Image: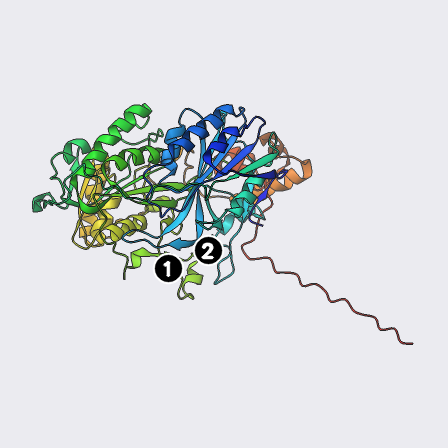
Amino acid sequence: MAQKSENCVPLKTQDIKLKNIEELKHLVPSAPAVWFFVLPHNASCNIVGIDPDFIKCLKDFIDKGCNETVVCLLTAPQAAPELLLNLEGKIHYKLWVSVKYDKPISQENKLPLNHSELLILGKYKENLKHTKTRVPYTYCPACDKTTKDYGGKKHTYHEYGTLMSDVWRNISISPDEFPTSIVDRLINLFGLSPYKKLFVVDMLKMFDYKKRVRIRKAFDLIKTNEIDKKDINVLHNGDCLEVLKDIPSNSIDYCFADPPYNLKKKYDNWNDSLDTQDYFKWCDKWLYELGRIIKPGCTVTVLNIPLWAVRHYKYLSEILNFQNWITWEGLSLPVRMIMPANYSFLCFTKGSPRKLSLDNNKELLSLKEFYCVRQSCINKRINDKEPITDLWWDIHRLKHNTRRVDHPCQLPPTLMRRLISLFTNKGEVVLDPFNGVATTTLSAEQINRKYIGIELSEYYHTIAMKRHKELLRGLDPFRKNGSTPKAKNSLVPRLKKQKYAVSKKELQLEVKRIAQVTGKLPTREEVKGNSKYPIEYYDDYFISWGEVCAAARTTGMVETREPVKKKKKERIKVVRP
């Protein structure tokens, strides 16, 4: 089974065959239902526009829907932004899901394609209504233990599997065939009131995207310039728009930008809660500058959440040429029932892209899918790597505070080394306009690239300068440093360092015992009256009462695969005459 949904009544499916787009006008989504439109989703198409008649009919269809209508659209990554932008104001964005291909598609001077996008939209404003759905644990082909090492937290996880995220890899689809596995998932994901039916509208073969490449000529595609040596390997403390204006056109080999996301993060010296329109006007200004300074054939990469990436895509596609949409499964905090793990790297080139540096480079090898990262297993394995595609699952966020410095959003250096190795050669220049504490520029220097970093905050700039000096002294700037940074990437408060008289696991299992006796999750007062441990332990060792009750809310799991029980052979009695 590819998933298990709690309190689910699977939807009945009804297939709808349309002969042409015009027939879409006759569909009336009056009753609450989920509609799944299967569009051409082969990402190898050079998409420059979706049929405007389809967009018009889809808008009319949405207008006729009731308030509970949910619309799911399976499409190619570079078509998804156009769909969302055209439907803006007609329906509310709910979820962006990347779905893995069963086999990557090779393409010239670009990463192999390995995913399509599933857009989930709703007529209502509230959060998406869906069942609590889990996907089963995956097991390492080498040691047969769970892919993730759950360590001392196994008692807080479910016996079946983990909550589903917005990157679907335990199912896969073919880019040219009907996605049965997605239908099977949707009938369970939405198997709750008021929904009873999933209407599946197969438009896979009905129309195709226009297959032609449009070479943008917003900039000079021939002339290149060289940066003065004194301006290379420099960290600037200032406004990126001011610094970028002084950099010659067609002079940088690779630009990477991880801008503030406008999600109210606590950056030093930056207002990360700008009005959305002002935010994107500001983004367009530095995106233009990156397009101006990048050399012909070279790449600009922008990281953002998918919804914001849609707007970046719109602007970049007006001045540069689309190269790749890389999905990074970078699971952060489990803040909702579908865990947010989907981050987008938009890759655009000036003119036609040059050849990628894919050969003989260890940075560009991915851990094969579902292999674990236990050192004891790694030491025994051979042949556990494969070439990367445009779906990255093997690079994880920095989990331990000892590897972080005082900045709320730090990317893993392995991620930056992969991007820089992919799009540059040794000795070329890498530029980051939001360099922060220098993860990009340090990674570039580590693999023999030149760099230019720009950072507005004097505080972060000072940290960046210090880390580059450490690298010159032979120290690893990404080493464990033994300190706890002040900045945090979440609103959850950080606990003070302390010695535990009793382990947190033991306390959580004690609460689970009390819950089994009382038949419900216990309150603080009930734990105080029934636990063999002082209530102060629970108050001091946990961030919230929800964490105290984590084990009581679930079943617990083991990291080894359950053995398959062999059926006993029935003994045949022989009756002698």
**Is any atom of residue 401 visible in this view?**
yes
Few, some or many C-alpha atoms within 10 Å of disc 1 (few <14, some 14-19, many ≥20)? few
Residue at the image point whose x is 53% and y is 54% from the top = 559
Residue at the image point whose x is 50% and y is 25% from the top = 124
**Is any atom of residue 489 visible in this view?**
no
Height in image: 96 above or below 352? above
Quadrant where the C terminus sits is: bottom right
Where's residue 372, x and y in %?
Answer: 45, 56
Q: How is the image coloured?
A: rainbow
The circle drawn on residue 386 is: 1
Q: Is residue 484 left or right of residue 129?
A: left
The circle drawn on residue 364 is: none
Height in image: 490 above or below 449? above
Where disc 1 sits, the SS reads strand
Considering depth in this image, is 212 or 472 the residue closer to the camera? 212
Decide which of tag 2 and tag 1 comes sooner along the chain. Answer: 2
The quarter of the picture where residue 39 lies is top left
Few, some or many C-alpha atoms within 10 Å of disc 2 (few <14, some 14-19, many ≥20)? some
Residue at the image point whose x is 36% and y is 43% from the top = 401
The quarter of the picture where residue 256 lies is top left
Q: Which residue is mark 2?
A: 370
